[in-house]
Image (spheres, rainbow, N blue to C red):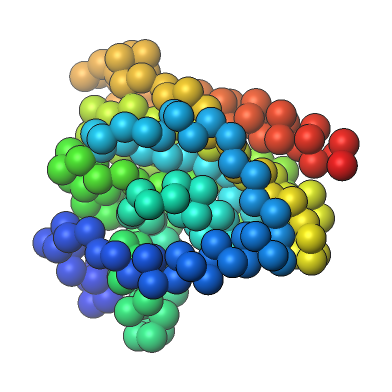
Amino acid sequence: MEEKKYFDFSDYKTRKGFNVFRPLCNLCCNTRIKLVVEGEENIKRDDGFIIAANHSIIYDPIFIATACKDKLLHFVAKYEVFKNPIVAAILKSCNAFPIVRGKGDMQAINYASDLIKKGKVLCIFPEGTRSRDGYPKKAKSGVGYIARNAKCDVVPAAICISEKGKFGSEVYVKFGEAIKYEDMNFTEEGGNKENKEVANMVMDNIVLLWRECRKKCKSK
């Protein structure tokens, strides 16, 4: 696949590049916006798992990474952004890796699964792209596929912004209770149908969290 030119899929090292940007991100989240984090107890664990969140603006990975405080995450990013060598270098330093969307990119999916098996935390946006109107959309089957391969739990997360991009906006990040691997009811025969069903289950949990956050945004 074309993205092989831009990333070494044999490298599972967790890099600390985000720690360089973390002070600036914390500053922005404490001055330009107000970041409100709930459900932190649901990510206080030492095993490998998935954080799955809705996606509406380019800063969502930063909001999630900042909300996770000192935990270093691995991110899935569209392979097109890796064509720019400067952007690619920054993304790699922050543990992002490329995926070709809509083509069943098994190399990226297997890499993601292996990261989790090695005890890493993967952040994925199941919709596969940003929602232009801010409302969560349907999930692609990828999050289900990775959960099946890695035999891992999925922690749903919601991101809701009171006034998109405006100074003083409140950004709510809420982590829900983990969806246990055992509760996903995978079978050997289920295949992609079950992957899609699990992806829908994950997205349903994200939407419930998002609605809770949205009520708080609208009440301000």
Identify the residue at horizontal 31%, vertical 21% (top origin): 181
Whether residue 192 is visible to the viewer of this picture, yes or no, is no
Q: Is residue 77 left or right of residue 119?
A: right
Q: Is residue 162 left or right of residue 127?
A: right
Residue 91 in percent (x, y) is at 37, 71
Residue sitting at the far left: 10
Q: Is residue 186 left or right of residue 216?
A: left
Which quadrant holds the C terminus?
A: top right
Identify the residue at horizontal 79%, vertical 60% (top origin): 168
Q: Quadrant of residue 174?
A: top right
Q: Quadrant of residue 99?
A: bottom left
Whether residue 165 is visible to the viewer of this picture, yes or no, is yes
Residue 50 vertical position relative to residue 134 in the rendered view, above or below: above
Residue 96 in percent (x, y) is at 35, 62
Residue sitting at the far right: 219
- Comparing 46 with 127, the one in front is 46
Identify the residue at horizontal 45%, vertical 71% (top origin): 21
Q: How many marks?
A: 0
Residue 51 vertical position relative to residue 168 in the rendered view, above or below: above
Residue 51 in percent (x, y) is at 42, 40
Residue 158 in percent (x, y) is at 60, 39
Which quadrant holds the N terminus?
A: bottom left
Residue 81 vertical position relative to residue 103 in the rendered view, above or below: below
Identify the residue at horizontal 18%, vertical 69% (top origin): 8
